[in-house]
Amino acid sequence: MKRKLLLILWVLANIFVIFSLSLYQSGYTLKGYVPAYGKDALKYAPVLYANPDDRPVKVLYELDRHGGISYYYVWPTESTGKPLIDRFYDYVRRLFYGSSADVEPVTVYPKNQTITFESYSHRRVWAKFVDGTCYVVGGEAIENCTVNGTHVKVYVVTWNHLFSLLPQSGLVRVNLTPEPMSPWEYAHYSIFRRANESIREAAIRSLFLAVVVTAVLNLAGYYLLIKRELWRKIRNELKRES
């Protein structure tokens, strides 16, 4: 029984180490970075509403090559409310992003008065705001959805900080002044990786690789051990006969 337990712990430790090494990749890159300063950044900054006990600590903005302004809301972490899951997820995020911070963007295109973000189940939402009304693509028209016609009201509606344009009860307005994103912040928060890679897909891929590599290494080690023991027995038999 003790040997079986040790064997199970050994295999799990192998999987954990290989999973961690496979998932960890440096996300510190300036690839895709565009200088953040723009005259419309403050004029079109969204008005964010969030849970009073789970508010972002800062908002950084960056311009893109298509005339958009991306506002990145930064939370210290994400929490499901389940300590064991949160601890493991925090570990995975540190490996993949370099920190446990959660960074969620809302992008506004001032030229055509369009806003986009991820909502429930990571579904991409696009909406056009005109004269205080937001017209969601493939959805409904939401009246009184802006402040002064340019600041769209956005509501945090999930534990992992995804958004909606529909008003929600129990949320409070977040009063943060957008700041231009520096090259250091772009690299520190792994913005390029967040925009181009899926942490879920990377974790599944790394887990699969860890299981396969663990199986191959341990089976190879077992085979070599058995082969070594067999040769030892053969040598001992030859010595006795001689």
Image: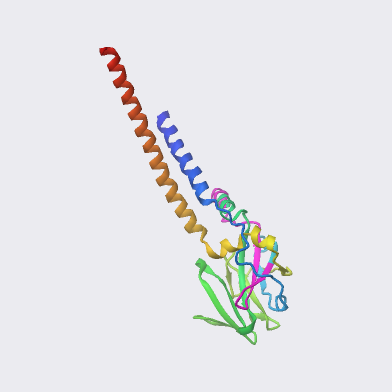
Q: Please state the extent of the stretch shown in magenta in the rendering.
A: 60-89
- Report which quarter residue 186 is drawn in: bottom right
Does 225 appear above or below 185? above
Camera-nearest residue between 8 and 239: 239
- Report which quarter residue 129 is drawn in: bottom right
Camera-nearest residue between 193 and 45: 193
- Report which quarter residue 235 is drawn in: top left
Does 212 appear above or below 67? above
Q: Is residue 234 visible?
A: yes
- Location of the C terminus (image quadrant): top left
- Location of the N terminus (image quadrant): top left
Does 224 appear above or below 177? above
Q: Is residue 41 left or right of residue 26?
A: right
Q: Where residue 99 sits: x, y (%)?
A: 62, 54
Does 235 appear above or below 124? above
Camera-nearest residue between 148 and 27: 27
